[in-house]
Image (cartoon, grey):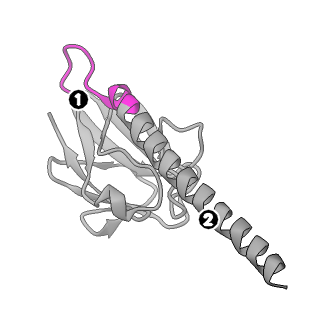
């Protein structure tokens, strides 16, 4: 009986060690992949583009999110991989919000998302809203600050 219990405990302990090692490797991978993705959202050559900056602490969120996202032209944010900005927040819809930059002005339009989008605490309707420098944007579990360049 003691031998069976000892064998079971050994396999449980080995499984726990492997799960721990897997968790460490996963964290290293996510950290490395987020470093490589920063160039994708950086400034374009010779252009000062507006961007949104994450206010939340990234460590407190249970999904991968960048510190900043540069807004250039028409960009859609959502959970689906077909979006320009993909964030796997469970409270973000597949196609959640569209940012449009035209003639130096940026507008934001909710795309009929389930949980809505908010600018300075007010829920967006169907019509686009023009953003001003310093506006606070709430999408899903995240808060962003809109910055004009």
* Residue carrying label 1: 49
Q: Is residue 74 above or below residue 68?
A: above
- Which quarter shows the N terminus? bottom right
Residue 124 — which label? none
Residue 16 — which label? 2
Is residue 135 visible in the rendered structure shown here? yes
Q: Position of residue 31 (x, y in %)?
A: 40, 42
Is residue 112 visible in the rendered structure shown here? no
Q: Position of residue 87 (x, y in %)?
A: 48, 49
Label 2 residue SS: helix
Between discs 2 and 1, the one toward the N terminus: 2
- Which quarter shows the C terminus? top left
Viewer-closest of 42 and 117: 42
Q: Position of residue 115 (x, y in %)?
A: 50, 67
Residue at 77 percent across and 71 percent down: it is 7
The stretch in magenta equals 36-49
Category of crowding for the residue at label 2, using alpha-carbon neighbours closer than 10 angstroms: few (below 14), some (14–19), many (at least 20): few
Q: Is residue 13 part of the magenta span, yes or no?
A: no
Residue at 46 percent across and 49 percent down: it is 27
Q: Position of residue 106 (x, y in %)?
A: 28, 39
Image check: 5 left or right of 75? right
């Amino acid at each position: 009986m003691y031998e069976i219990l000892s064998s079971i405990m050994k396999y449980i302990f080995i499984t726990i060690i492997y799960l721990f090692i897997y968790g460490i490797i996963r964290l290293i991978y996510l950290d490395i992949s987020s470093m490589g993705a920063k160039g994708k959202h950086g400034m374009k050559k010779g252009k000062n583009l507006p961007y949104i900056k994450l206010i939340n602490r990234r460590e407190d969120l249970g999904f991968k999110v960048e510190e900043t996202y540069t807004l250039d032209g028409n960009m859609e944010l959502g959970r689906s991989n077909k979006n320009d900005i993909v964030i796997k927040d469970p409270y973000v819809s597949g196609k959640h919000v569209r940012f449009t930059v035209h003639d130096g002005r940026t507008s934001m339009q909710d795309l009929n998302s389930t949980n809505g989008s908010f600018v300075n605490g007010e829920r967006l309707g169907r019509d686009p809203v023009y953003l001003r420098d310093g506006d606070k944007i709430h999408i899903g579990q995240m808060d962003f600050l809109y910055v004009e360049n």
